[in-house]
Image (cartoon, rainbow, N blue to C red):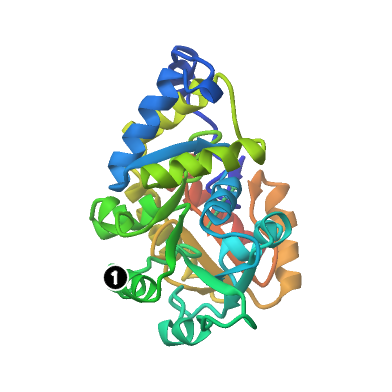
Amino acid sequence: MIDFRSDTVTHPSPEMRAFMANARVGDDVFGDDPTVNALEMRVAKLLGLESAMLVPSGTQSNLIALLTHCGRGDEYIVGQDYHTYKYEAGGAASLGSIQPQPLAVSGDGTLDLDMVKKTIKPNDFHFAKTRLLALENTHSGKIISNDYLNQASRLARDNGLYFHLDGARVFNAAVAQNISVKEITSQFDSVSVCCSKGLGAPIGSLLCGSESFINTARRWRKMVGGGMRQAGILAAAIDFALSHNIERLKDDHDNARYLAELLSTVPSIRVESPHTNMLYIELENAEVGAELQQALATRGILISSGRRVRLVTHLDIDMAAIERFVAEVKTIL
Ligand SMILES: *Cc1c(COP(=O)(O)O)cnc(C)c1O
């Protein structure tokens, strides 16, 4: 199987599995798991923040960040198409009584900062209290520049807002810009990173922030059911991923560009240029997309359906897989 649907589909390598099997473990709800404790320290340092906490998923990580920063009746500003707002089942509103203030996302993946400023509510009892600005990097594979992040950070600070980053794929952003990840993350009050995407671990995200933020976040994690026991088995997979799979994200980015190059020779496909490991292509219409998906599936290749299709490169896709995919696409179309 060649699977272009997402970078979440990777399987842990035999080396990663062996590393997991040999992990020293303890009860992490008691704070006793040495592998989890070491991982949390490692990730906090990597991101330039004081503390980190292992959680089962990125969705839970973002939810806990919002629950920790915002109270009932507070508001957070977020992109209409950001994961935190659109793809997390409305958790902040439903479980936290936190009102989202979604804004349109610009073509480059950012929010218009003048618009953000206008949206911050005055201190008046008619309004919810605007508490937080949530950004995403990368967004749909697009890198958000540090220039923009610095401006957004200043805006948040000048207006007394907490500043949260959904950094599910922030390592892709760092590698693509050839900078350390902390140059992106250290200015945020909280950052969520996913390890089950391009990094190739099977499960797990980390929420990072100040020590007092993480201390409060641990109670919310317990409440939403994210306290895990011998979680060192998962932490070991992430530890392995951090040691072996960060620098190689460059291969995924190179492969996405290679895929774009090859597909641009197919006349009926419009190819957008990829920033990182995601390539978007446009087909004539959604029916062509559905037919292409079905025909590829019978040849052992998985893609999403639609008129605009996202193709994602990852650990389990190499140049040969890309060449085979493009040859099959040409035959089918
Ligand atoms: C995947 C993802 C998340 C979290 O997803 P989980 O599947 O819950 O781990 C959050 N934000 C973005 C941008 C993502 O792509």
Residue, disc 1: 150
Q: Label 1, secondary structure: give it.
A: helix
Q: Position of residue 212 (x, y in %)?
A: 41, 44
Q: Position of residue 99 (x, y in %)?
A: 65, 69
In the foreground, 115 or 287: 115
Q: Residue furthest front?
A: 125
The kind of residue tagged 1 is Asn
In the foreground, 269 or 110: 110
Q: Position of residue 14 (x, y in %)?
A: 47, 21
Is the residue marked by circle 1 packed among few (<14), some (14-19), or many (20+) residues within 10 Å? some
Left or right of residue 240: residue 303: right
Left or right of residue 153: residue 25: right
Can residue 162 be seen here? yes
Corner quadrant of residue 83 = bottom right
Instruction: Name the residue: 65% across, 49% down.
Output: 302
Q: Quadrant of the C terminus?
A: bottom right
Instruction: Name the residue: 59% across, 43% down.
Output: 220
Instruction: Name the residue: 62% across, 39% down.
Output: 1
